[in-house]
Amino acid sequence: MYKPGDVRVEEREDPKLVEPTDAIIRLTATCICGSDLWPYRGAEPVDHQVMGHEYIGVVQEIGSAVRTIKAGDFVVGSFWASDNTCGICTAGYQAYCVHRVLMGTIGTQSELARIPLADGTLVATPGPPDADLVPSLMAASDVLGTGWFAAVAAEAGPGKTVAVVGDATRSSGGLKSPGRCQTVSRTLVAVRWSIAW
């Protein structure tokens, strides 16, 4: 995104492993997040920024220190790269990892992407997913984690009622577990409602 309202597709060099904890993935699906729309509309500054932080794909190459994934694995990535080993990660707050990297600064609106801290950032699925599962996996890349964090922060749980205002997929993602709580949620976008519930 060059400036508000100015998005361009450009040829870039293929990413390479930089750290031994990196992986290179071939993107199978990626999408634009609502947070990408703020700078597009001019509500936030932007100047030649790469785009994308919601993504799934197939591992092409791993660094020498990567242990939990291998080339050929189908993976779901997180919008924050995290090591999943620091004290903050082990307490369940990977978005605040002391080594975190915002994937939007790397950009996943591409054919290939370098994923830092691959062991803590990428989750392998049991195999390649059916096409009808791809939208749900995309939701797991960003909105599920956001919703889960919101549910934990709100201390949602059995016997409680939680009101969700706004985007049902993002806000309700962490509240869908059986027995979690009663949820009152609304969105004006029908497709989001169908994905959320």
Image: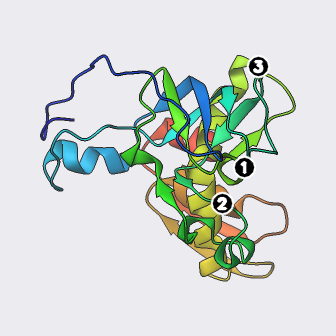
Q: Which residue is mark 2?
A: 83
Foreground residue among 197 and 127: 127
Disc 3 or 2, which lies upstream in sequence? 2
Q: Is residue 165 left or right of residue 65?
A: left
Query: In what quadrant of the picture does the N terminus appear?
Result: top left
With respect to residue 130, does 70 lie above or below?
A: below
Residue 52 point in image, percent of width and height: 41, 38
Residue at 56% from the left image edge and 51% from the top image edge: 143
3D distance between C-alphas at marks 2 and 1: 7 Å
Residue 129 point in image, percent of width and height: 77, 24
On the question of residue 172 being in view, the answer is: no
Contact check, label 2 and label 1, Cβ < 8 Å: yes
3D distance between C-alphas at marks 1 and 3: 24 Å
Foreground residue among 189 and 111: 111
Disc 1 or 3, which lies upstream in sequence? 1
- Amino acid on which the number 2 mark rests in the picture: Asp
Q: How is the image coloured?
A: rainbow
Q: Which residue is mark 1?
A: 119
Residue at 35% from the left image edge and 51% from the top image edge: 35
Mark drawn on residue 65: none
Label 1 secondary element = helix
Q: Which residue is mark 3?
A: 130
